[in-house]
Amino acid sequence: MKKKGNLWSNKRKTFIFCIVIVMLVVVSISFVSFFKSDVIDEENEKTPYNSMYNASRYFFRVFYPDDWDVNADSYGFLLNPEGLVLEAYPLKKIPVTPAPTAADGSTPVVTASPTLSSQPTTSATIDPREGMERNKDLTMSFYYKEYDALYEYIKTLVPSAPPSAEVSPTPTATPEIPSPSGNTEVISSASPEKKEPPMELEIIADYVFEQFQKEHEATGYGYSSKKGYQADTVEFVVLPYSYIKDDIKMTGELYVAARAMAYYIIQVEGTESAFRKYNNVVQNILYHITFSVFDY
């Protein structure tokens, strides 16, 4: 009896030991995979995507992946009076509709239209977005805003507003001098300097966030603390928020950046699951956004 007890005790120790070894192996593999994933994500973030939209009228460029697309005006103008320049969004495969079944149970044969060999093709490159449609679960909206309304906001702040806030948003005209021939010549600088925004980015962001919260005051939006985000060449102030829409939790972030003559709002919003799913792509797009025309 004692011998059986010792045998069971030894087997139990061996069994427990095996379980511990298996758990250690699983934890080790998970840790290595997690670390490797972080390294890959970090490397991907440093590399801009191949597709690019140049919002030349509003002085910025956006890089996005092949399984995303953009919605913009055909001539590069604003999409609406609120200053919407561009929408970027992920794509999903268009679901295949099954062929209709005939009354006798057989599937009718559908003959494809013949392609004429003489018909010219515009490109031999395969469109990576062919067979894809917009995934409405998440959208990045890029807004261009002028400073006019902000100067009125500055007056509502504490009595001593920053001196720079009193500067008119209209740029100073470039000095002109008459040439010997009698024509007017423009004095140009050999190397244009990067002009600064007329006020602190924090003031601009506070204005944007205050207006956004007023607009959604009665709709049950929740907000987290604002934070900073330093992209490759652009500094942002960010306001995270969330709300419920049709029993689905929506998650969003407002990114605010400033330039000398205008400021920008980038709104990222989608379902909570889509927000998590596309987070790395969104961060890459934001990290590589580029402002053009330095003296603007």
Image (cartoon, helix red, strand yellow):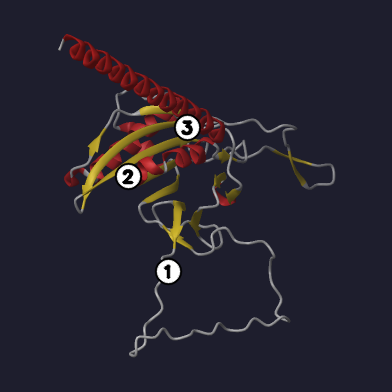
**Which residue shows up at 69% across the image and 72% down it?**
121
**Which residue shows up at 55% across the image and 82% down it?**
112
Q: Which mark is residue 222?
A: none
The amino acid marked with disc number 3 is Val
Q: Residue furthest right?
A: 181
Q: Residues within 10 Å of mark 3 (few under 14, many from 20)?
A: few
Q: Is residue 9 above or below residue 129?
A: above
How far apart are the two marked residues, 3 and 2, measured between alpha carbons? Answer: 44 Å
Mark 2 vs mark 1: in front: 1
Q: Marks 2 and 3: in contact by CB < 8 Å?
A: no
The amino acid marked with disc number 2 is Ser
How far apart are the two marked residues, 2 and 1, measured between alpha carbons? Answer: 24 Å
Q: Residue furthest left?
A: 1
Q: Which residue is mark 3?
A: 167
Q: Position of residue 146 (x, y in %)?
A: 45, 44
Q: Position of residue 149 (x, y in %)?
A: 37, 42
Q: Which residue is mark 1?
A: 96
Q: Mark 3 or mark 2, which has the lower sequence index?
A: 3
Q: Is residue 249 left or right of residue 79?
A: left
Q: Which residue is mark 2?
A: 273
Quadrant of the image for the C terminus? top right
Secondary structure beneath dot 2 equals helix
Whether residue 153 is visible, yes or no, is no
Q: Position of residue 176 (x, y in %)?
A: 70, 40
Mark 3 vs mark 1: in front: 1
The amino acid marked with disc number 1 is Val
Q: Is residue 20 above or below residue 220?
A: above
Q: Residues within 10 Å of mark 2 (few under 14, many from 20)?
A: some
